[in-house]
Amino acid sequence: MPLLPALQDPAGPPAAREAVRFGEQSLTYAQLAAAADALAARIAGAGRVAVWAAPAPETVVAVVAALRAGVPAVPLNPKTGERELAHIVADSAPSTVLAAAGDVLPPALAALTRVDVDTGTAPSPAANRENTSSFDEPSPEAPALIVYTSGTTGPPKGAVLPRRAVAATLDALEDAWQWTGDDVLVHALPLFHVHGLILGILGPLRRGGSVRHLGRFSTEGVARELESGGTMLFGVPTMYHRLAEALAVPAASDGLAKALAGARLLVSGSAALPVHDHERIAAATGRRVIERYGMTETLMNTGVRADGEPRPGTVGAPLRGVELRLVEEDGGALADPASIGEIQVRGPNLFTGYLNRPDATAAALTADGWFRTGDMATLDPDGYVRIVGRKATDLIKSGGYKIGAGEIENALLEHPGVREAAVTGEPDPDLGERIVAWVVPADPASPPTADELAGHVAAQLSPHKRPRTVHYLDALPRNDLGKIMKRSLHG
């Protein structure tokens, strides 16, 4: 089966169906197929191509063209700094960069052959998607994309994602979310990473559906697109937090609440959605946001099903084809099945390795093929996964207890004086680590006291989970996907 059958199968969606829309710019399936195949003919045989992944239809054409030609694509974040961009280019060694004609590219890409992407290629009047080009479908193990990790523990690593992994993840989500060609996906996610590009663009295209990209997130844009036919919304917690804030403004909330209530699925990912935002959205719309869990190296691992229970604080059960287990720090089975352990996963959704880094690949995988995620979690009795955070930054060992930062953050966010919160651990001579809270107060002129917050957490959870130190900030540092960059927080 081709990776994108809807663009080739004569029995696929009507050629005139809208495939992608970015503001006023849209491409039908016929237009996308024609533009992508024309570009694929130009890049065929290239070793790798870089894609300047701006939120625009040219990015979609470029990625689809690379997939059609069997050429691995390296999506580039247009906001990446010069040093990091130079590292990615040197590491991935693309021969060519694909960009929109009007894009101004940085000096780090100057040595690459530039090919401007044309979205205006006219479809043949007698277009037959079964014979639109002479490209053969590559092996399922052939690399589709090389996506670079965030580089929190060193220079970014290129995760080589085979076509098999992309297909397995998207088909597992089709099963879990009852995703069909009738769905119209709305999102505003960046197109250089797994969430926005693979799930948010290739997902609808594999199903034969449509995607409407907002370009830039706004609550007005979400309401407009959902009210005009959108059936699914993908977002990150920052976006859902802004939706929850907008729903709290009576004069402007009715249209937004109606639009969200009319969506078939509201999906959050890339970081944990705080429970209080879950509850605020549900109270205003009658609809629950569902969560899923994945990584660059594994694509999607778990998800709450469309016909399942949307349980705040969980990311659902393993998706079809994915094996998941929790282990102790030494890799052994949990002594207490109800305790916190590291998530390991195995299945067709996994990457094939880090580009040029056999050492890092070997360190990430066990001898029998389990990927060490570095994420810590507990399992509900019915298999739902509750992630408590990253092993390196969110697992706090204090006074002999293993404590997940996530549950303390959720408790802090239930305090009316807290707008945003993050929790870290810091060395402590007595406790091993002490719990530190980083708080953005709802009213900066009158923040809740440290004692008040400690008492609130102790009453909600237990005394050993209370923060011993509280820092007040104007805003939490976040990356492009809305994840809090805890390594930027220092006492």
Image: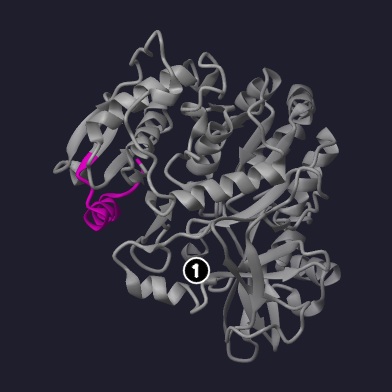
SS type, badge 1: loop
Q: Residue at x 67, y 17 (%)?
A: 228
The one nearer the camera, 240 or 190, is: 190
- The residue positioned farthest toward the top in the image shown: 125
Q: Is residue 132 above or below residue 241?
A: above
Residue 66 falls inside the magenta stretch: no
In the picture provided, is 147 more to the left or to the right than 439?
A: left
- The image position of residue 167, as x and y in percent, is 53, 46
- The residue positioned farthest toward the left in the image shown: 111
- The image position of residue 110, as x and y in percent, is 16, 41
Q: Residue at x 17, y 42 (%)?
A: 112
Magenta span = 78-96
The one nearer the camera, 434 or 330, is: 330
Going by the numbered disc 1, the residue's amino acid type is His
Q: Is residue 159 above or below residue 193?
A: below
For disc 1, the marked residue is 490
Q: Is residue 209 above or below residue 305?
A: above
Q: Toward which corner of the image does residue 88 lie, by quadrant?
A: bottom left
Residue 87 falls inside the magenta stretch: yes
How is the structure coloured here?
A: one colour
- The image position of residue 320, as x and y in percent, is 67, 54
Q: Residue at x 48, y 66 (%)?
A: 487
In the picture provided, is 17 more to the left or to the right than 464?
A: left
Q: Toward which corner of the image does residue 199 lie, by quadrant?
A: top right
Whether residue 221 is visible, yes or no, is yes
In the picture provided, is 212 more to the left or to the right than 255?
A: left
The one nearer the camera, 130 or 84, is: 130
Q: Residues within 10 Å of mark 1 (few under 14, many from 20)?
A: few
Report the label total: 1
